[in-house]
Amino acid sequence: MQLFPINAGHFKLDGGAMFGVVPKMLWNKHYPADESNLCSWAMRCLLVQDGNRLVLIDNGMGNKQDEKFFSHYQMHGEDTLDSSLKKAGFHRDEITDVFLTHLHFDHCGGSIEWDDSRAGFRPAFKNATYWSNAEHWQWATQPNPREKASFLKENILPIQESGQLEFLSGDELFKGFAVERVHGHTESMMLPVLEVNGRKVMYMADLLPSPVHVPVAWVMAYDTRPLLTMQEKASVLQTCVEQDRILFFEHDKSIECATLQHTEKGIRVGETFPLSALFS
């Protein structure tokens, strides 16, 4: 199995929303906010090559939304999904599977694009099977008021209409690609755990958007069940320490991977490094 980080770009989100009840004087040291209290975040996807399968985990927010939408999130930087795929030596038409951890717009917006007439939509990965799960799909297509703005129907419904959607019912996509579910951020978010070169790499999605979020109490205001997130984080972090897992971060602006260690203050980040170090 080979892994490639795929950066779909950077965007900005409110620092208070990303760090919840944690005081700004603490998180601002790690993520300095601009004059609008916005911090820069990555949309770091992961490409998994295993035999004949080429699996893309998440795909950013895409480019089909209107100018007003993008003005809220201030996309910036030179990285795009296609340029990052090209840098890794691939093209979107080679993707066999698109694995969606969850259906918030910054994780699945790249799934769907305008058709040639711009009157309708089509899958951006024409040869891929798209993977979600039945519980999260129902949650996203019948959204609660808290998350409604994050579940955009144009990102979601065309996947099913295309006939390319499948629901994962078990705990693995294939051997070496296990899946663990958590429910605090949103219902049935899926976290891939990949076995590569004798190590386990866990794609953290929005359970841990950055290494700064490792302390259990550092929970995003976006989470629908913050107390459950804390419980899930504590359990996942303990497992990661015991199994010496490598954590892969989707949203940190610069850090791709980290290990964990026990400290007097609890479980904290150990080493940080690029994913390429795993293959050097």
Image (cartoon, rainbow, N blue to C red):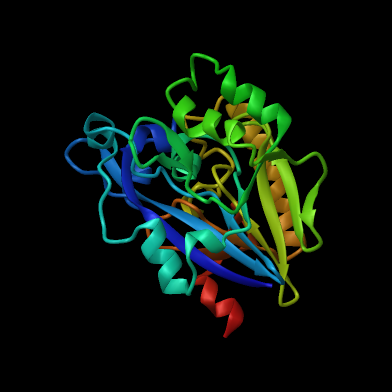
Residue 136 lies, in percent from the top left, at 66, 30
Image height check: is 74 above or below 42?
Answer: above
Q: Is residue 226 visible?
A: yes
241 with respect to 230 (left or right):
right
The image quarter in which residue 20 lies: top left
Nearer to me, 260 or 223: 223
Q: Nearer the viewer, residue 73 or 134?
A: 134
Q: Can residue 22 be seen here?
A: no
Residue with the most extreme top position: 145
Foreground pick, 198 / 134:
134
Left or right for 101, reference 168: left
Horizontal and vertical percent position of residue 100: 59, 44
**Image spot of residue 175 (x, y percent):** 81, 62
Residue lying farthest left? 35
At x 39%, y 40%, the residue is: 115
Q: Residue at x 69, y 63 (%)?
A: 245
* Residue 27, placed above or below residue 161: below
| Left or right: 208 as drawn, with respect to 189 | left
Outermost residue to the front: 117
Q: Quadrant of residue 280?
A: bottom right
Name the image quarter holding residue 202.
bottom right
